[in-house]
Amino acid sequence: MFSIDILLNAIVTGILLGSVYASLALGLAITFGILHIPNIAHPTLVVAGAFFVYTLAQWGLDPIVAAVIGLVPFYVLGLALYLFYSRVFERRGGANVLQSLTLFFGLSLVVEILLVLSFGSELKSVNVSYIGSSLKFGALTVPYRLLIPALLGPVMIAAVWLYLSRTNSGTAIRAVAHEERALSIAGLDPAAVKRHAFGIATATAVVAGAALIMIGPVEPFGGRFQIGRVFAIVVLAGMGSIPGNLVIAIVIGVAEALVASYLNPSWSPGVAFAILLLGLAFRPQGLFGAAR
Amino acid sequence: MRKNSFLFLAAVGIVLVLGFLLPWMVRNPFYFFVGYVVLQYVTIATGWNILGGYAGYINFGAAGFFGSGVYLSAFLFTTLGLPLPLCILAAAIFGAILGVLTGYLTLRIQGVYFAIATLGLVVVLETIVHNISALGGASGMAVYGPRPPAWSPGPSQYNFTVMLIIAVASVALARFVEISWIGRGLRAVKASEDAAECSGVPTLRLKLLACALSGAVLAAAGAPYPFYTSYVEPVTAFSLIIGLNAIAMPLIGGTKSWSGPVLGALLLASVQQIATVTISSELNILFVGLVLIAFVAFAPGGLADLFGRKPSGGAKP
């Protein structure tokens, strides 16, 4: 029953899955973790990104190239979403968290239905030459369809993290959540900074979407199964800690892979949520966050 | 207040008598088939509003509570042969326990986390039901409902009357919560949790109580569902449209008072029943989603504020 091969394969698969989960959660780590906007529509935007990549792949483009092309329209989409969000709530003087949750909930439904109406509700997948074969390394078998998306995650996360920690506009994004007034005294427009951050967060959705559709087929309602997972990652990572994001995502990925290979794959959707509930109950400030 | 309560009780009496008499006066069972769904949503919206409207804690997982009610009642009825009222009671108790558990784990922190936890709750409950073979797993199970008693002309009419009783009981419960000390405490929690805590309001206990009552009503709304469809399976029992309507109906009707969810549910559920017959169910969800966004964005007080009296300068959420 117990064999080292199965364990090793499960752990490697888990690490790779986790790194994909990290790229799914990255956008949320910016909007929810840094800006404190509960954007529960993010997983749906990732699915929309996957469909964008699918459309371009139909014309013969490589999914990764398609994702890079998608960065610009998704950045603009993010600007538009933030503009709508801020217009709605600024008129009322400050956003009520619960109302914004409801707004994004409605938004994600509308996006899902628009996807169903334009693509149908069947599963969609992309076909590329490197998908299908596997990298064999002793007893270890790693399919390329998992390896390549898993490499996208750390690259994107490193890029965003360097941007946020090393550049001036990245520092402004981290500052805007802490002290909006100080930022405007320093001569920056907080609304513009937030809009820019929301744009970046939405742009990461198209890369995550490319990763998602390379791993396996995607359907319009697929975002719903990711919500528990991505929020678990962002909350447990400690709200806005980008490297913590990657670590927690890998922990969850490994836990799911272990449950899938030793218990039953049909139990794994519950794993992330169970981890989230335990985390909220015992360490609400996250594993890498400061106490607040 | 006393005179209002008397009027309310009189209205409840009239509605209940109508519920027993209408099945003998209207011959076409289709009206009761449709009416059941509308009443089911009145119950769901009312149950959701006890926590969401009065306390301001958003529950995205209404479908989780509803689905557990559906499955518990189907299981108890088919394996143990419990009578329908006991199934409903058991579902309500289970919903209350589920509400308290979810609330206990997440309510101590912040409202956002509660909302996120409820989002995941549906997925987890659906996963559990998928994996239990006694509940039929993914393929579902058939339920042969109880024979309608002599006072009801047929199964559709019987289900309608049962649902009407649950709906009326839920509305009465919501109204009691609203006008009693519980409602005052919950409104204080909604206005400012810190201020409420400082002035001695037992906020955590009140929130847990609201979770329990809300969960009980939501699960009870699902209890007669297996007998209405004669078949239960995870996808419809934990359907997205239930969670969506549970939020949309109170927000459209107005969340401050018990009449808001009732109004919103009667309106939206009737429109949906007409819409599903005439247009596709995708467009139906799209329509509800857009209406929900429009109300959150432009009329946060719901119809009650748009057409009713102006809000009297009370505490804003």
Image: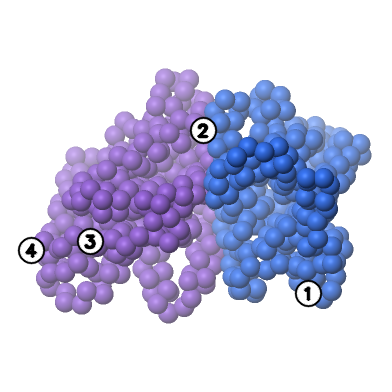
Chain colours: A blue, B purple
The amino acid type found where label 2 is placed reads: Thr
Return the residue at label 4: B150
Residue A270 makes an appearance in the image: yes
Which residue is at 16% across, 69% downward?
Answer: B154
Q: Earlier in the sequence, mark 3 or mark 4?
A: 3
Q: Earlier in the sequence, mark 2 or mark 4?
A: 2
**Disc 1: which chain?**
A
Mark 1–mark 4 distance (CA, rounded to whole Å):
63 Å
**Disc 3: which chain?**
B
Horizontal side, residue B55 vs residue A102: left or right: left
Return the residue at label 1: A58
Could you say which disc has been placed on residue B145 in the image?
3
**Disc 2: which chain?**
B
Q: Residues within 10 Å of mark 2 (few under 14, many from 20)?
A: many
Total number of numbered labels?
Answer: 4
Return the residue at label 2: B106
Mark 1 residue element: helix
Mark 3–mark 4 distance (CA, rounded to whole Å):
15 Å
| Marks 3 and 1 on same chain | no
Contact between marks 3 and 1 (CB within 8 A): the answer is: no
Horizontal side, residue A74 vs residue B182: left or right: right
The amino acid type found where label 1 is placed reads: Gln
The amino acid type found where label 4 is placed reads: Ala
Place of residue B75 in the rendered image (x, y in percent of width and height, measured from the top left):
30, 51
Q: Residues within 10 Å of mark 1 (few under 14, many from 20)?
A: few
Q: Earlier in the sequence, mark 3 or mark 2?
A: 2
